[in-house]
């Protein structure tokens, strides 16, 4: 097995400059090794001859600027290039009190090439630069670092973005402060097309800068969907043009804790420039208490005996005015958010209030629903889905909508979030057996922290590990890491997300065979050091340090 | 019970400007109410006539400057004083999906006094300003806010610091942006004299600024001991004058990840100015692996069969050179750290390596220790304690030193850290029954995070709830919140510490009768908003918002 060992040693010697997170589908290191220096003043990104996308493409131009800065300008002011080596700490599986081994991962024994590499040529096969990424976008790319030429080629501009991120992680810096890149060939593409991250801006308001920074780090992790759970019971920060009272009455503070139309546009464009889709969720008919003050008559008045109690429940599904409101609001939302998909929620509808209300009970009788309030919920959802369909939108719904047997368009995406009722592997089997596309979040509620290296559990999830045919497995379009906001705001968002969400990112991007936790630890710890260098407040995996710590010192 | 209700309503109406964290021992609101405005330009702190401490006292002068800035200059740049009300969110005990009630806590129906309050007079009974706080320091104070006069009186300058913090939390701001303080009388003193916080700078290095900021927030919480767990197995960041090789060889990075002599002096002085003692811990004979490279011969060589394995264990207790080294090092440490107490560690000594070493086994035989390696540990600890005593220092040790029946000076403080072996309430009983003073940390390992409001468990600990006589209870000098560094560095230290450590702070300062978690929630949530206003990255307790969010928006 000497050959195998030699490869391992080579990988170790190539070190961080060759470790990419998430791991590419295929990476080859030519037998002879070798590397070339990059000189910041002389290095540039450029469109290759014959590329369908070139100068004037905002997505590409902006990415070139970002990555140039990340490569050569992101080091903290106190960066000491004289620091001789970069260490990572291998997690000690022995009892506490043992020193973890330090592994030197500085490239050595590499022959620098004589000539610096002066440009990365980017070739894009398909025209298109002004549109938005979609579920069908091709994100594959090839990156070739060989003697005298650096070439990145991709089908689309979105694939080029993924390749630029990979390229930026391949560049290292030697003991003299010289930037370099090792000779390598990468062929890469995502395992799943939907790789999302959910932020909740209702339980706590997140300032715009926190959302934009999250989009940055999502791009570093090759996430491609920002699921914006924008409103919920506690607050309604979305400033609606059609119904401005919703945020005026429903935001924590109508002046300071809101997203204006221009804020929303900024998020959408910032995401687009990084190849990230923005899928907004306006969850109904439950989770809408904050909508009440700004939309009189929308919510169901709850009763205590014969009289209204003063409290309100889910959206009132028996009034025509409700559907007029929903139509107008979703018409606006459909226009504001360009993605084909909206997330319509539909989870956790509490029937207590509906049951208490005599008019609702009368309606149930009239409709022949008996005591089955799931039928009433389905009645509402059905009409909502028809409304949204009329705006030429697709929809994603939480699993209850499927569980409650609402009639769905066959192209509906079911979002599986319950961990144990039923076990999520069963739900994945059920959803795909019924022919619907499935999106997995159940094991990836990253808000649910626990002590220790809890990223490992997230990492070891296998989305296709459920009983089902190959056709069923094909229906799994990906998953989302969720960061619900009960205990999270701008003070702890970044350290809770990063690098933990990176575990989900690699699971959704890399090959199914990439699963060794110890190997992932070393690469993720190194990637986290790179995040610190880029100014991201990413928390440590375990004992150790980075050459560039957060804030620089 | 109308009177009781009236008081409650009054407290609610007085709102955040009257809520102090940790809650004072006694606070009275005069029947008529009333308040006076404070005008930033005209307001000043000053020594009262006859005060034993006055102008020229650095502790007091620096505190006056700090608190003036905290009162009038700490609001974020985007602070909107026009925001009409300040809300806190009462935690909903109902199922998720219910809107939590918002309680308006802006003072209303208060008659502003005509005349602004222009100064807080501070009277200190006992001279002394250049010394250090100690276990015996008196921290009691009285604060009187009455018509035409604001008076703070204390036995010592340390008590004056506690009173200034309380004063700063009493000042509110009304809807017009006017600062004010409500009429009140406070008599306050700590329940326990030792109220500590442990930071671990070995598993991750914490930059100086993170330590200094922690000292700031400790003062806001009336903590008075910084337990600096400065070195351990993973790294040795303390730059020793006597043994410079320890950090040169043992720090993560000898240039960037070290505490120089001037860093240490800055920490000690910064703490002193806030009435905080700095107790350094140099834990031996275990937890010393990082000492090895810089101190050849100090650690025990471990054996694999008949040959040294290349690994090292605890400090070698059988060599004279060990005690020469320990004497020199602790002589330096005793001089550098002015507090009477050193923390000598003594926890988790692994006997495996000692058992493997033939010279150690021979020594065991010679000494008649049989197979009882606890006797060898005691042999080392005994000599260490004698050495430290010879430098006129007192010592604190982890509980194993007591458990292993080492002969101790009667004034030794035993630090109880094990939660379940034995249950810590038993250990508290055992330690105090043996006549030693006890310090509690077992239920306060704040590094051990869990999902949800885990501050509540820390809050509900009662340090004196163990079987024992009143004399035994008297021996409990307090406790420490611990933030061990396996998973904590500068990226997540502040949000993990604050406001969670505040739960321990109130438990150790306030009266034993202060224990209602719902009441504590409202005050702690409000205190957390105040921490944000002061620029501290304190995480949220639960759903809601603050008028001044972190970073300002």
Image: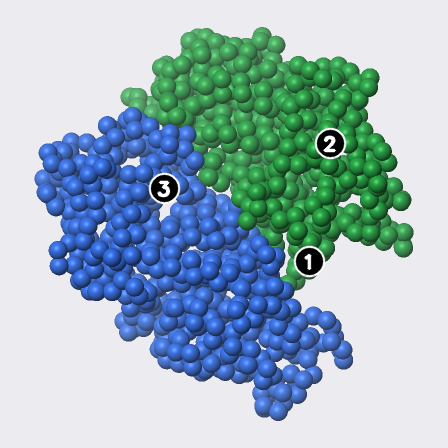
Chain colours: A green, B blue
> In the figure, is residue A223 to the left or right of B334?
right
Q: Front-most of A547 and A420?
A: A547
- The span from disc 1 to disc 2 (Cα, nearest Å) is 34 Å
| Quadrant position of the N terminus of chain A in the picture | bottom right
The mark lying in front, picked from 1 and 2, is 2
Q: Front-most of A441 and B252?
A: B252
Residue B543 can be seen, yes or no: no
Image mark for residue B534: 3
Figure check: A342 above or below A347:
above
Image mark for residue A102: 1
- Mark 1 Cα-neighbour bin, 10 Å: few <14, some 14–19, many ≥20: few
Q: Position of residue B204 (x, y in %)?
A: 56, 55
SS category of the residue bearing label 3: loop
The residue singled out by tag 2 in the image is: A43
Residue at 29 percent across and 57 percent down: it is B59
Give the quadrant of residue B274: bottom left
- Mark 3 Cα-neighbour bin, 10 Å: few <14, some 14–19, many ≥20: some
Figure check: B527 above or below A324:
below
- The span from disc 1 to disc 3 (Cα, nearest Å) is 39 Å
Residue at 33 percent across and 25 percent down: it is A311
**Which chain letter matches label 2?**
A
Q: Position of residue A121 (x, y in %)?
A: 78, 26
């Amino acid at each position: 097995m000497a050959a195998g060992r030699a490869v391992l040693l080579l990988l170790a010697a190539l070190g961080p400059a060759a470790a990419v997170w998430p791991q590419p589908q295929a990476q080859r290191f030519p037998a002879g090794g070798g590397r070339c220096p990059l000189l910041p003043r002389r290095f540039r990104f450029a469109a290759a001859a014959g590329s369908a996308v070139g100068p004037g493409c905002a997505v590409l131009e902006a990415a070139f600027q970002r990555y140039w800065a990340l490569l050569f300008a992101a080091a903290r002011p106190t960066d000491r290039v004289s620091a001789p080596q970069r260490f990572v700490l291998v997690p000690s599986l022995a009892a506490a009190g043992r020193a973890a081994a330090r592994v030197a991962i500085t490239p050595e024994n590499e022959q620098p090439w004589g000539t610096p590499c002066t440009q990365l040529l980017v070739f894009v096969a398909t025209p298109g630069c002004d549109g938005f990424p979609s579920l069908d976008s091709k994100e594959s790319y090839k990156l070739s670092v060989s003697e005298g030429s650096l070439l990145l080629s991709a089908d689309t501009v979105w694939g080029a973005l993924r390749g630029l991120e990979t390229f930026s992680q391949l560049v290292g810096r030697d003991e003299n402060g010289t930037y370099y890149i090792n000779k390598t060939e990468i062929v890469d593409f995502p395992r799943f097309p939907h790789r999302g991250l959910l932020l909740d801006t209702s339980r706590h308001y997140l300032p715009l800068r926190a959302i934009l920074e999250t989009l940055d780090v999502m791009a570093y992790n090759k996430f491609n969907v920002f699921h914006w759970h924008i409103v919920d019971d506690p607050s309604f920060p979305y400033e609606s043009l059609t119904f401005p009272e919703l945020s005026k009455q429903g935001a924590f503070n109508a002046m300071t804790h809101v997203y204006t139309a221009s804020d929303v546009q900024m998020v959408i464009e910032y995401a687009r420039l990084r190849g990230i889709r923005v899928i907004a969720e306006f969850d109904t008919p439950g989770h809408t208490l904050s909508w009440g003050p700004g939309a009189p008559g929308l919510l169901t008045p709850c009763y205590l005996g014969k009289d209204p109690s003063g409290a309100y429940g889910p959206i009132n599904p028996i009034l025509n005015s409700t559907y007029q409101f929903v139509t107008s609001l979703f018409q606006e939302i459909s226009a504001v958010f360009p993605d084909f998909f909206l997330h319509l929620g539909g989870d956790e509808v509490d029937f207590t209030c509906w049951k208490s209300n005599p008019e609702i009970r009368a309606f149930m009788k009239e409709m022949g629903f008996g005591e089955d309030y799931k039928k009433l919920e389905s009645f509402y959802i059905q009409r909502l889905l028809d409304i949204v369909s009329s705006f030429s939108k697709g929809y994603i719904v939480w699993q209850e909508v499927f569980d409650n047997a609402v009639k769905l368009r066959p192209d509906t995406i079911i979002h599986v979030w319950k961990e144990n009722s039923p076990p999520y592997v069963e739900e994945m089997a059920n959803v795909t057996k019924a022919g619907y596309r499935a999106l997995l979040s159940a094991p990836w509620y990253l808000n649910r922290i626990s002590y220790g290296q809890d990223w490992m559990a997230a990492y070891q999830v296998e989305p296709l590990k459920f009983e089902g045919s190959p056709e069923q497995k094909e229906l799994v379009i990906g998953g989302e890491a969720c960061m619900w906001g009960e205990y999270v705001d701008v003070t702890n968002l970044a350290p809770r997300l990063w690098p933990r969400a990176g575990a989900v990112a690699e699971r959704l991007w890399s090959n199914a065979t990439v699963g060794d936790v110890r190997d992932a630890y070393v690469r993720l710890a190194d990637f986290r050091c790179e995040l610190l260098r880029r100014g991201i407040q990413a928390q440590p995996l375990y004992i150790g340090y980075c050459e560039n710590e957060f804030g620089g010192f």
